[in-house]
Image (tube, rainbow, N blue to C red):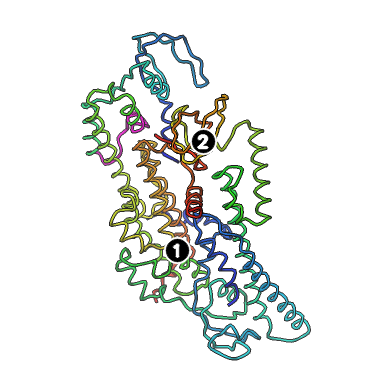
Amino acid sequence: MFGEKALELVKELKRSGDGSLPPYNEDCVRQVLDEMKALFEQNQKDVSATVAGEGGRIAGVQLRHASLERNKRCLLAYVYNRMEKIRDMRWDFGSVLPDDVKNNLNEHELSWFGRYNRSLAKYMRSVGIDLTQDSKPPKSLYIEVRCLVDYGEFETEDGNVVLLKKNSQHLLHRADCEHLIRQGILEHII
Amino acid sequence: MADDSLYGSLQVRPSGWDYFELDDILACQEKIPCTFETQVKDLGFLDHGSDSEHIEPATKMELPFWLAKELCARQRKIISVELPKVYREAYRQILEADATAVDLNKLGPYFYSVGGKLLEFGNAENPRIAETLMMTYMKRMRRLMDLSLNKLDGSKESQTLLPKLDHDEHNVFAFSQEGLREFEQWKQGVISKLTSSKTVINQRKRKRTEDN
Amino acid sequence: MDPSEVDFLSEKQHVKILPNFKEGRIFLISGDLGPFEPGLTAEVPLWMAVNLKQRKKCRIIPPDWMNIGQLEERKDEEKEREYFTEMPSKSYLELASLLLKSARDDIPHADEVQTLIKDIWEIRMAKLRKSINIMMQEKETHARLDNLTHLEINSIRPFLTSALDRMHILRCNVVENPSTGTDY
């Protein structure tokens, strides 16, 4: 049946769920496009034949057309849902993506991420607030954190330098460390 | 009894809203039993049971819903469709007898969604199908509500109920549970704890296993 | 909404405190506060009260209704009445939680107070679930519930909205496929 390859793309995304984005399946996408090309060309032939007077070809054209629409839907959904995930990554990881995540994006997706990043930055500058801060209503100005990895030196907003070694604990300004917590470098201790 | 004329003026979400939704795409893949009314030239290879070059009239085949719908759409119907067995009278009676016990996940994980789509074929049994879908949902909702609002999903009752849920019910349950979880966290005073997102946590876990 | 957001909004409520410091009027966007004199009651928003308490600059005076006698009366009333009684504050649970956590020593019989408030919450939530169930079974499209508080509404929101969303679509199916009246 037509559309089976395209469905694989959809299933692949569905399987990955909340987790990471799988690598862009260049191969599968190409196979779907090839199927679409074949369907389209066959339809063109049949339509010309019908116009020339041959009968009985409309049913086939309809069937192939439905398959073309189905393939198109699957491809668009694949690209669109990946795009939404990549957008969410800006809010999860920050403006720089870790390498292993970056490797799963194709060049168009990387370019899109860069543009989204710039749009967001421009907007935040114009409004004057860092929207990625304060994902939860703040309970206090300073928070206690534990460092999960050897990060190195970190300069706080008021100019102090803190050495973030694995397992060290610090009392830091909330605004300073929110994005480090989100990236998994620090752990918030209540 | 609720005022149906008032209700009838409310709109369902416009169709096409879920064009990009992965679940809707998967639901549209559900197989429908069909009979070809006309010949379809050159596509005989789609019928695994026959060797002929064309699909001949009267051929019976299971087609995915997305295709069946299109082939029924115009004036000249290329196929005629039958209801899949889980939407027929026999199964409807089982649902009426005890809706909460039925394993809707087994009947097809997109039971309600596909049921709604079947209505597009204008079958004479449509009113009964629509009624059954709604009654089943309402009866099962009560149990779903009790469980999803009361206990977190580790509980024994949830464990027995969860595998029997249809996809839509599962989403309601999960959404509701998340609310409950957040409330519990609030009570314990840990909800204001800043955390990384699941994506980041999973990525770090994977990285650590790769580095080892 | 996140409960922490509901909580945050509830911190705007005013409570009475007994400051141990002296300070003139403070001008905030949400209104003026003070002046503060040691030993003289002042009224401040909850967030400030908790902050001052943590810095040991005041004692918090629990609201009138937060005592065993009144709470027991409320609990009995809530049990008897079919509908929801009016709560002293639209954020009674948040207020109580916050005070019991940060100013426990300022609340007489804190343990009993905590248990009583929890009991009232449970009774109200059970009523809420029952009333929603009735609403769904009767296929009502809307219901009116007076005197619900923010956190109660918030706790029911995820379930209610997603469950009713699905039900709406299923109901539309029925409306669009009316039975002709002839049985087959």
Q: Is residue A75 left or right of residue B58?
A: right
Q: Nearer the viewer, mark 2 or mark 1?
A: 2
Q: Which residue is mark 2?
A: A178
Q: Chain of mark 2?
A: A
Asked whether C94 falls inside the magenta stretch, the response is yes
Q: Quadrant where the N terminus of chain C lies?
A: top left
Asked whether A49 falls inside the magenta stretch, the response is no
* Viewer-closest of B74 and A94: A94
Is C32 above or below relative to A19? above
Tell me where residue A38 sits by quadrant. bottom right
| Residue C183 in picture, x, y percent from top left | 39, 74
Is B209 above or below relative to A59? above
What's the residue at 58%, 88% (across, down)? B57
Is A71 above or below relative to C118? below
What's the residue at 47%, 11% (across, down)? C25
Indicate the secondary structure of the residue bearing disc 1. helix
Is C99 above or below relative to B206? above
User: Is label 2 on the same chain as label 1?
Assistant: no
* Viewer-closest of C85 and C15: C15
Provide the residue span drawn in magenta.
C80-96
Q: Which mark is residue A100?
A: none
Q: Is residue A173 left or right of residue B93?
A: right
The crowd level at tag 2 (other Cα within 10 Å; few <14, some 14-19, many 20+) is many
Instruction: Please name the amino acid that badge 1 sits on.
Output: Val
Q: Which residue is mark 1?
A: C174
| Residue B108 in picture, x, y percent from top left | 43, 69
Most common secondary structure along the magenta stretch: loop
Q: Chain of mark 1?
A: C
Instruction: Give how far apart the Cα atoms at labels 2 and 1 are.
Output: 50 Å
| Residue B130 in picture, x, y percent from top left | 43, 66
Q: Is residue A149 left or right of residue C133?
A: right
| Residue C184 in picture, x, y percent from top left | 39, 77
